[in-house]
Image: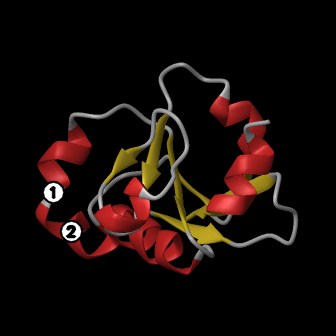
Amino acid sequence: MGCVIQVTKSLFTASYLCLKKLPIMKNIKELLQDPKATILDVRSPMEYQSGHIEGAVNIPVDEIAYRIDELKALTPPFILYCRSGARSSMAAHYMMQAGFTEVYNAGGLADMRILTM
């Protein structure tokens, strides 16, 4: 079942809508407590090296399509972030197109730092 990311104004809530148009709301803080969750930093390796969320896997947005097998080896839910939220939104879209369903755009690094406090 394909889903589409829905951007919300609250930085603590992400949602996605499945094709049946049934909204499924998830609290990002709650998702971050899941020991199986995968945090993806989709910024460049240089940005990642300058500071990132502990435990985050760095897969730049422009490499998502080439690293699908690597992503399939990771466990959902997938919580994505970048600098501002734009690249993580694009990466989430690519992942959804590749068949991933539990994909959440958590926004930018500053947002994630607040969420992981």
Above or below, 48 against 113 in this view is below
Residue at the spot 23% in from the left edge and 41% down from the top edge: 72
Q: Secondary structure at mark 2?
A: helix
Q: Which residue of the protein is positioned furthest toward the right in this rendering? A: 10
Assess whether mark 1 and mark 2 are in contact (beta carbons under 8 angstroms). yes
Q: In the depicted view, which residue is nearer to us: 84 or 97?
A: 84
Residue hosting label 1? 67
| Image quadrant assignment for residue 35 | top right
Residue at the spot 75% in from the left edge and 32% down from the top edge: 30
Q: Secondary structure at mark 1?
A: loop
The type of residue carrying mark 2 is Glu
- The disc placed on residue 76 is none
Residue at the spot 33% in from the left edge and 66% down from the top edge: 46
Left or right: where does residue 61 sit relative to residue 79? Answer: left
Above or below, 83 against 104 in this view is below
Q: In the depicted view, which residue is nearer to us: 22 or 16?
A: 16
**x and y, in percent, of residue 108 in the image:** 64, 66
